[in-house]
Every structure is written in structure tokens, then in C-alpha cells.
Image (tube, rainbow, N blue to C red):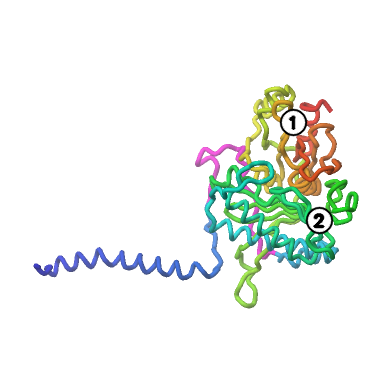
């Protein structure tokens, strides 16, 4: 074969050099990605008028803090009950496990169905199994119940709490890689009739509740003694590095969150009910006529969680003859209700107009209508849809 000339050799070197550098950079990236080094944010000056963004987009106004308190620090100062602190930590550790599992699991049909006949997805089963592993090995949990199979199961006879959960709310949108979440309500095991801490109890009897949101980041809102706090998992901001070079697994990113009385954000679920519920149709027309901003994904967790980040919002899910309500009282409505009311918001049971927290749990799989969020908007729902 003809040997390349010096000029050709020079040209080949010029081509190969960038490829070699890119390959080396890729190898370095793969090697260093396993270590959790802090990621520095890039400051950008983004103005709404430059991109034609609407003034109703509600961008965040949260500014970076010099440091963030740890989970342990916040619980010691804002949760007086030591045993309650322990069960909160156990639930957060499980949410961390679910986070890691979701990052590596494919979304496929598992080949099984839950008690409602819904096909279970691989991620549903993974999340539910992790929750069961948590409560069955817990020192604090006496009884557990999952939305996937709503039966109260005894865990630790010496435990003090009854824990109910929806392991992965948003199964219908998780295959889109949209945000989903875990909802957890915690009662004393002696609540209600005293048989299992659930039957005969109300949402107001809850000792605490937690909602985890799995999106680009994992964040969890928790009801503590003096308000609602948000914790973020796996973040590496300055000031949160531990002496051994690792980072706090959970840091507190929002404290004493409040939900404003008024809102311009609406999340309308069960819109089919508007076909035979004139009041709901009128309410939806009101939102549109008054240029409210629609923020609705079809997932209960992201659709209600945004009320804590935007400090406003209303989620409505009424009931009607042709489109009855499907939300579970113990697994979804009551835990979220405690958080929203703790943050200054309001709830409606969608029938009497009373608080969802005052509805007695008579069956494990009890269904309910719900309106939840900014107080004035829930009052508008009660007046327009229920005539209350």
C-alpha cells in the first residue's frame, strides 16, 4: 500500500486529535460521574419579554441560600415527638430508595393486576415492595396499608403508628417520564375504633403526612409541628458538605411554606363531570374568562404539589352521576389535605363543602370528591359547584 505523504499525515493527525480528546473526556466523565461532586449552576439573565413568555407563567423567585439546614437539624427543632421523628426518617429513606429505583427501572407491564383490576407496572410493584420492606422492618409501624391492595396489615406489634400510602401516584403518566410521586399518611395505631388506627379515624387524626415528588429532583413536603417543610434529596449545594467529603442526603429547601388565599392557577380534574354538573361547567368557564393559568398534568402529586412551590393554586375533582369521584380518602385526599390546611390552604369534600379532614374513614378503599388549595378558590368551588 502507498504510504501517506507528510502533508497527508498532518491532515490525519488534525482529524484524529479532536476525536482522541473527545474520547478521553468521555472516559473521564464516566469515571467521575460515579462520585457526587457539587454541580455549580450557570447564571442566566432570562427576561420574559425576550422570549415572548406570558406574564402568567409564574417563574420561581426562590433565591440561592448561603447554606441549608439538614433533615436532622429541622426535625430536632420542629418535631417534638422523638418517635414521630423516627418514622418520618424511615419514610424519607424509603422515598430515597424509590428515587434510585425509578432512575434505573424500565416502565413495563408487570403481568399482574391490583385489587381494582388495573394492570400493575414494573415501577408500581418496585415502589410498593420498597414501602412494604420499610414498614415491615420498622420499629415504629404497627400497621400498614397500600393503595395497591387496600387491606390493613399488621407489621410490628410493638409499633405505634398506622401508615397508609400510595406507592407511585401517576401510573398513567409515568411511561411519559412525567413527574410522579408517593403519598403517605401516618396515624396513631389507636386512632378511630382503635382496631388498626384507620377505620373510624379522620384525616384530622393524622400525626403527619408526607408527599414525595419524583421529577428532575426528588423533593418531599412534610407536615411538622409548626408548618410544612420541604426536603430535597441528593443535592450538593455549597455549605452542605460533610467532614468526610460526602453530602447531606436530605437538606431542607423550604420552611414554613404557605399557600396564599387567592390564586390564578387552576388544575381541573374529572372534567367529564362538567357534562352533567352545570356548576362545574360554570366554574371552568370562570377560570377561562378570567384568564387563569392552566397547570394540569393528570397526576395528583404534581398537580397539587405545585401549590407549595407557587404558593397558590386550586385542584378540583368533583363527583357526578356519570363521572363519580375516584380519589382514595385514606391514601390520597387525607394526606394532601393535612399538608394543604397546615400551609394555610383549604379543602372541600366536594359534597357538603366541609373539610376533607373531617370525613370519617369507614372503609380502607373509601372514595371521595375533593377540592383543595387556595382558600378563596375552594370557597368559590363550594359556592359555584355545590351551592354552599
Q: Nearer the viewer, residue 158 or 317?
A: 158
Q: x, y (%) of residue 196?
A: 85, 53
Q: Quadrant of the C terminus?
A: top right
Asked whether residue 367 is in view, the answer is yes
Which quadrant of the structure image shows residue 369? top right
Tell me if 332 is positioned left or right of 173 in this view: right
Which residue is located at x 74 percent, y 42 percent? 328
Which residue is tagged 1? Answer: 319
Element carrying mark 2? strand
Seen in the picture, residue 95 relative to 381 is either above or below; the reply is: below
Observer-side mark, 1 or 2, equals: 2
Crowding at dot 2, Cα within 10 Å, few <14 / some 14-19 / many 20+, comes out as many
Q: Residue at x 71, y 49 (%)?
A: 149
Identify the mark at residue 355; answer none if there is no mark: none
Specify the segment rendered in magenta.
45-68
* Percent x, y of residue 3: 11, 69
Q: Nearer the viewer, residue 304 or 320?
A: 320
Amino acid at each position: 500500500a502507498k504510504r501517506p505523504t507528510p502533508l497527508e499525515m498532518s491532515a490525519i493527525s488534525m482529524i484524529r486529535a479532536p476525536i482522541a480528546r473527545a474520547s478521553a473526556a468521555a472516559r473521564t466523565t464516566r469515571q467521575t460521574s460515579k462520585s457526587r461532586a457539587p454541580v455549580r449552576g450557570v447564571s442566566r439573565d432570562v427576561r420574559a419579554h425576550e422570549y415572548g413568555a406570558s406574564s402568567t407563567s409564574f417563574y420561581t423567585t426562590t433565591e440561592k441560600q448561603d447554606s441549608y439546614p439538614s433533615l436532622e437539624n429541622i426535625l430536632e427543632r420542629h418535631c417534638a415527638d422523638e418517635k414521630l421523628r423516627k418514622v418520618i426518617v424511615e419514610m424519607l429513606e424509603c422515598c430515597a430508595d424509590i428515587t434510585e429505583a425509578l432512575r434505573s427501572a424500565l416502565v413495563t407491564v408487570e403481568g399482574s393486576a391490583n385489587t381494582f383490576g388495573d394492570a400493575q407496572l414494573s415501577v408500581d410493584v418496585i415502589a410498593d415492595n420498597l414501602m412494604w420492606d420499610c414498614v415491615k422492618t420498622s420499629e415504629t409501624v404497627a400497621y400498614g396499608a397500600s393503595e395497591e391492595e387496600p387491606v390493613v396489615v399488621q407489621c410490628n406489634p410493638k409499633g405505634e403508628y398506622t401508615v397508609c400510602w400510595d406507592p407511585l401516584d401517576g401510573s398513567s403518566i409515568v411511561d411519559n417520564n412525567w413527574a410522579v410521586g408517593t403519598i403517605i399518611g401516618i396515624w396513631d395505631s389507636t386512632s378511630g375504633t382503635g382496631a388498626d388506627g384507620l377505620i373510624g379515624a379522620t384525616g384530622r387524626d393524622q400525626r403527619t403526612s408526607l408527599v414525595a415528588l419524583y421529577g428532575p429532583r426528588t423533593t418531599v413536603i412534610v407536615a411538622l409541628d409548626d408548618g410544612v417543610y420541604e426536603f430535597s434529596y441528593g443535592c450538593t449545594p455549597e455549605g452542605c458538605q460533610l467532614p468526610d467529603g460526602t453530602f447531606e442526603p436530605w437538606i431542607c429547601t423550604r420552611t414554613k411554606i404557605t399557600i396564599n388565599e387567592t390564586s390564578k392557577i387552576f388544575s381541573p380534574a374529572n372534567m367529564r363531570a362538567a357534562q352533567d354538573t352545570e356548576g362545574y361547567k360554570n366554574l371552568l368557564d370562570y377560570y377561562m374568562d378570567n384568564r387563569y393559568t392552566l397547570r394540569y398534568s393528570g397526576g395528583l402529586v404534581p398537580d397539587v404539589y405545585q401549590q407549595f412551590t407557587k404558593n397558590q393554586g386550586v385542584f378540583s375533582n368533583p363527583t357526578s352521576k356519570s363521572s363519580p369521584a375516584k380519589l382514595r380518602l385514606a391514601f390520597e385526599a387525607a394526606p394532601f389535605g393535612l399538608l394543604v390546611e397546615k400551609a394555610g390552604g383549604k379543602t372541600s369534600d366536594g359534597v357538603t363543602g366541609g373539610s376533607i379532614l373531617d370525613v370519617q374513614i369507614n372503609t380502607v378503599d373509601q372514595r371521595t370528591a375533593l377540592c383543595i388549595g387556595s382558600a378563596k378558590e375552594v370557597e368559590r368551588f363550594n359556592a359555584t359547584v355545590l351551592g354552599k
